[in-house]
Amino acid sequence: MNYTSEKELLDDFLNGEERACAHVYNRYFSRICLYASNFVDESKEAEDIAEEGFIRLWQSRRRFESLSHLKAALYQATRHVGINHQTARKRRLNRVDSYVAQQEPDQKSHLHELVYAETMAELYDAIQKLPPKAREIIQLSYLAGNSNQEIADLLQLNIQTVKNQKLRALGLLRQHLTRDSFNYLLSLIVLFGKI
């Protein structure tokens, strides 16, 4: 129902008429969401805050002198919800930070060692699936630490052949490794500068 009288709308809103609430909601929701976005990063959270602001205003059963007064109260209710949301979020983050800080360094080290061991096992398995020449070049390069020239001399190959085999092997490894393991391999390559 469209209201032609502001007084009628405000009276119905005070009396808990759902159509009055729906009218106010439809009229102001988008601007209240925009205002609520100042308190959060995601639009869904802003919508939740805006809706909570509407609910608080609706439940307050306050008498409003005008639509401007109602709108100001709606902004105020939304502001309180937004501030409460920020405060609760900060508390949660502080608890997480506190928990992480309390973890012993050797627990973190242990986790890193587990990740390293699992990643290296996956890498070794993938290397075993490579064709013999590519496998040999990858092992000599990344596992034994030889330079391209040293590998070329050792295998009596052209240095460009060594480079081509390494690139081909990396392409094949990408097919056999998870994205994280392949990225780990690439970080080792960048770290040691060996392509």
Image (spheres, rainbow, N blue to C red):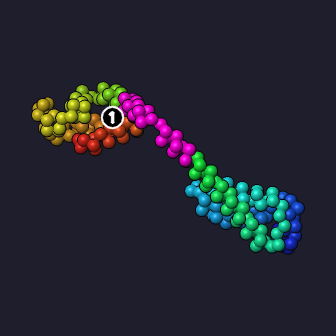
Q: Is residue 118 visible?
A: yes
Residue 104 percent location from the top left of the image: 45, 35
Query: Which one is nearer the viewer's eye here, 16 or 131?
Result: 16
Residue pictured at 11% horizontal, 34% vertical: 153
Above/below status of 129 relative to 66: above
Residue 46 percent location from the top left of the image: 63, 57
User: Is 63 within the magenta?
Assistant: no
The secondary structure that most of the magenta stretch takes on is helix
Question: The C terminus is located in which quarter?
Answer: top left
Q: Within the image, what quadrant is residue 178 found in?
A: top left
| Amino acid type, label 1 | Leu
Q: Within the image, what quadrant is residue 112 found in?
A: top left
Q: Residues within 10 Å of mark 1 (few under 14, many from 20)?
A: many
In the picture, measured across the screen, residue 52 lies left or right of residue 120, that is: right
In the picture, measured across the screen, residue 38 lies left or right of residue 19, that is: left
The span shown in magenta is 94-118
Question: The N terminus is located in which quarter?
Answer: bottom right
Residue pictured at 36% horizontal, 40% vertical: 183
Above/below status of 186 relative to 25: above
